[in-house]
Amino acid sequence: FPVTIKSGSETFLVSARNSSKEGIQSSDMVMVNADLEYHGDRKSSVDTPVQVELYKHFHNINYMIHGHAFFSNAITTDDYFPCGDLREAEAVKALFPNQFSDFFVVNLKNHGFLVGSATVNTLNNFLTSNIPTMQPFRYI
């Protein structure tokens, strides 16, 4: 599950590419700026461009989690886009035009889910009461 946290208006903490997300710690995060420049020797998740673009759009969202599973009752984007394709961000923004939304959950067609939240508590409450399901992409 790539994780991103807005740490300022122009900086983000993003989980490192190709790293285990089980028991993720702050040391597992990569600092990325709005121009997608990262600091250190580890690269950020391949989905970083999409999530940074969504942070720019959703002014109240401070946390995002992306996973390769699906929420049964969530809205789904119409088209498939591969990891990191900015058209995916445009598809999500079209589904949720309110730039000041405090929360959203969306299934990304044939790619998984994305949850955005203003607070950790809202994100935690949603994830503990709504478990995503693993299912073959062809059924979405």
Image: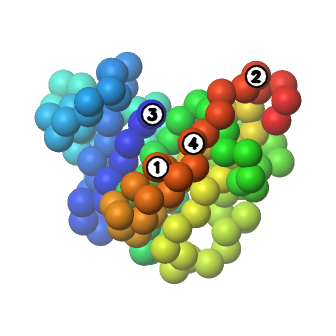
Q: Residues within 10 Å of mark 4 (few under 14, many from 20)?
A: few
Q: Is mark 1 in CB contact (under 8 Å) with mark 3?
A: no
User: Residue placed at 42% from the left, 65% from the top?
Assistant: 122
Mark 4: which amino acid?
Answer: Ile
Query: Nearer the viewer's eye, disc 1 or disc 3?
Result: 1
| Mark 2 residue type | Pro
The image's mark for residue 136 is 2
Which residue is denoted by mark 1 in the rendering? 128
Question: Which of the two marks, 4 or 3, is nearer to us in this view?
Answer: 4
- Amino acid at pointer 1: Thr
Q: Nearer the viewer, residue 91 or 72?
A: 72
Q: Which residue is mark 4?
A: 131
Front position among marks 2 and 1:
1
| Marked residue nearer the N-terminal end (3 or 2) | 3
Q: CA distance from mark 4 to mark 3?
A: 13 Å
Relative placement, left or right, of 107 versus 32 is right
